[in-house]
Image (cartoon, coloured by chain):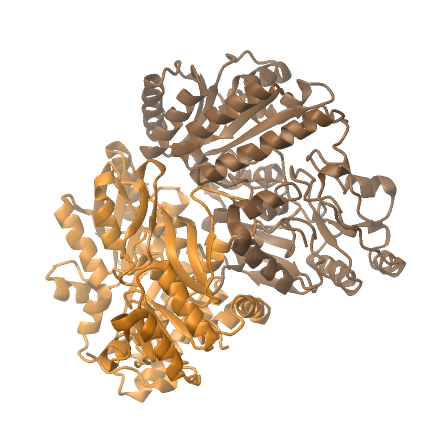
Chain colours: A orange, B brown
Amino acid sequence: MNAPLPARLLPQAASRPVPAALIEALKARFGERCSTAQAVREQHGRDESPFEVRPPDAVVFAESAEEVAAAVALAAAHEVPVIPFGVGSSLEGHLLAVQGGISIDLGRMNRIVALQPEDLTVTVQPGITRSQLNTEIRHTGLFFPIDPGADASIGGMAATRASGTNAVRYGTMRENVLGLQVVTASGEVIRTGTRARKSSAGYDLTRLFVGSEGTLGVMTEITLRLYPLPEAISAAICSFPSIDAAVQTTIQTIQLGVPIARCELLDAHAVRAVNRHDGLSLREGPMLLMEFHGSPAGVKEQAETVQEIAREFGGEDFQWATTPEERTRLWTARHHAYFAALQSRPGCRAVTTDACVPISHLGACLDETVAEADAAGLPYFIVGHVGDGNFHVGYLIDPADLRERELAERLSHQVVARALRFEGTCTGEHGIGLHKMDFLVEEAGEGGVALMRAIKQTLDPRNIMNPGKIFAL
Amino acid sequence: MNAPLPARLLPQAASRPVPAALIEALKARFGERCSTAQAVREQHGRDESPFEVRPPDAVVFAESAEEVAAAVALAAAHEVPVIPFGVGSSLEGHLLAVQGGISIDLGRMNRIVALQPEDLTVTVQPGITRSQLNTEIRHTGLFFPIDPGADASIGGMAATRASGTNAVRYGTMRENVLGLQVVTASGEVIRTGTRARKSSAGYDLTRLFVGSEGTLGVMTEITLRLYPLPEAISAAICSFPSIDAAVQTTIQTIQLGVPIARCELLDAHAVRAVNRHDGLSLREGPMLLMEFHGSPAGVKEQAETVQEIAREFGGEDFQWATTPEERTRLWTARHHAYFAALQSRPGCRAVTTDACVPISHLGACLDETVAEADAAGLPYFIVGHVGDGNFHVGYLIDPADLRERELAERLSHQVVARALRFEGTCTGEHGIGLHKMDFLVEEAGEGGVALMRAIKQTLDPRNIMNPGKIFAL
């Protein structure tokens, strides 16, 4: 376990007192499923972000929407914060109990509620993970494509508006959540959306909750779009003489309308880390890792088009992953990139950026970012969902070294400033959480954030739903 | 001009007094671009819905966001309603000044603000129509696919979360608006979203405004996703022995993951009306009108797959529209279906439904709807974006005949009740407007509507933004 970043990097927020009467009431209602054990609390007060643990005062393991509603109603009566917990894979400190309160662990609510293969829809509880979901629906010939690196819970993915490697073709959680059951801040259970593919029925409450990071309510059911497993899938890697060449290949591919399913950039540092971690022997230069979905003929056609484009930009010949096993090996390596990079510097922590820009600016944005990182001298790696214009720089710092911490924070801020200058966003898929609140103001403006805050205050007048995230409140 | 439905079908709402001081202030600011002429007011107090004209007290022809902000600020100071006006093609009474007030005509704000072909994005003013937009960007090789029947304004389409014939492949306004510039109820100008393809930066204000029907603010700029014009396009019609056979063909097509671009159902009544109106000689039975986009080989492959499915369900051989002229002729006929049907019964008005259900329920939902309409004896027609599970029944009524009016309203309500029973929505693409407010409560529940109302009251505390639409307030 690497040392966490000290609390001073967190926005200051006072813990609110949690009355003994609330803990007693929760224990009366939930029995042993309400825990105040130190180990359980600490496990629920951390995530994959570099911040120090901020444990909640108690953890409730809920098993139904009614139980979530009961826990929220009790917390509301005592004006105590409530933090929904899935698997803890957030990168932005979403799960830290910065104002104290009750963590509601949704891990036991991990069932498929209803599966309608004929409609390409499924309704799940929030605690199911994406890989569990895909395993359980495999017999239908369908899959749920949204694929962040971690095996996140669907609830957490909806709450952060997650995306990942397949988004360039299938969209993000924004496009793939059809409806929700939500426990509101008053403990009421409401539904948003229907199973219809589209609707013009009033305000889009579904998309208001998607990406709200637990600050407006607790999702207790999520209805998702599914997709037919492609008849043919083929994956290829291609090395390039420069990051820019890889990016230009991506841009032309998108502009030509090639329905590429995945288009991932790894810089030389990321490839090197992955080689060591997964025992691969990939060429240690900038690389695109691509996947094509469709009919056998369609996949062949797509691949030929992209190969032709890649050649123009000095790309080497494609190396194909032809069997499912080879494909899995490559994608597993890609998903390990973050942890592989962490292991490349023992004891380090990663300060990770999540900029997303219009693709025509991606080359310039990456060029400036690389030059700056090289000049700064901190170890770093870059991976990117470049088909969407989204990339992550991970600055690998020694958390005990104040200078490195501050340097990484400064570099991270500069990446955001650059992304905004290039008409992009400070976060493509991780969310604001604790760490990007100032960036949100830069991006959305005071007026936009004031509007978000007004909505928060209306839907959660006691400020109990995951307070202190997205904006200070 | 057919006689409108009398006001008694409208929810009752009191007009608010518009002080002479406000009109004077608007005339001082806008000169001749503020009109109180009867003809101008009446033109802005109607739309394509069957309701009687409810003219605003004045019409302001705005030419910039600053002017919209100035008009809204003046109206806000006098607590007078503001109704944004595009081209008036709403089917749900969105433009009627049911509580009086000022219509802001955005028709002169019809420019492209910025076009970035390399990013597949464009930013437009709200008054540009979809066909004007597509004409102006044709040289880029890109197009904007969202295509309701009418040549609506992009602002109106965003405000109603419109979709149309291409949505099965390209999504709706929900998926295709990246960002907005909005004048809020206080006359402040804010921006939502960026040009990045995805973002997790705070609440999704863009999608809160999209579909809010002018009740939360006035959109003054809209950033849209564009798509490469397909290399190959081919359109075909296919007649079926029954509506059910056409629907089953559609369902199998979707379930197989065929990326069909358009899949439109016309019932025998609609085909007959179109034949007369456009001088065509289509077989007067249930018909699918389809379009395939892709590479030449991809289009051929899609078409072969669908043709095979159609044959299984008794579909006749495809008739191809091979030239662009033939294709345009077919799609123009489809877009004329509504007006063609109106002309099939001189003097009539159409009461139109907009149900959208999960596709597995579409056959049963249509069967029951047809049986009920046949038994009721009112002339009607059905057209549907069946790939999305969305269909419109138009009941053609004599507006002077109280019995017919009430019958059509009852049938319409029963279609909604059926759609909700089948886990669908009362409106796939037209919006709630005046006419579906009760249906929204049935669909979203009191809790969901209360939440929408709370958001409205927070963002528009004086209730001046298009009041009396979506919910009574």
The answer, for residue A429, to whether it is visible in the render is no
Q: Position of residue B361 (x, y in %)?
A: 41, 33
The answer, for residue A467, to whether it is visible in the render is yes
Q: Position of residue A336 (x, y in %)?
A: 20, 63
On screen, residue A290 versus residue A417, left or right, reads left
| Picture residue at 62% right of the left edge, 64% below the top | B458
Query: Is the N terminus of chain A in the top left, top right, bottom left or bottom right quadrant?
Result: bottom left
Residue sitting nearer the eye, B201 or A291: B201
| Picture residue at 46% right of the left edge, 49% below the top | B118
B45 up-or-down from A273: above or below? above
B314 up-or-down from A160: above or below? above
B309 up-or-down from B196: above or below? above
Quadrant hosting residue A428: bottom left
How many discs appear? 0
Q: Residue furthest front?
A: A28
Q: Position of residue A233 (x, y in %)?
A: 23, 41
On screen, residue B443 versus residue A282, left or right, reads right
Residue sitting nearer the eye, B303 or B250: B250
Quadrant hosting residue A240: bottom left
Residue sitting nearer the eye, A275 or A28: A28
Q: Position of residue A166 (x, y in %)?
A: 31, 51
Q: Residue furthest left?
A: A279
Residue sitting nearer the eye, B403 or B384: B403
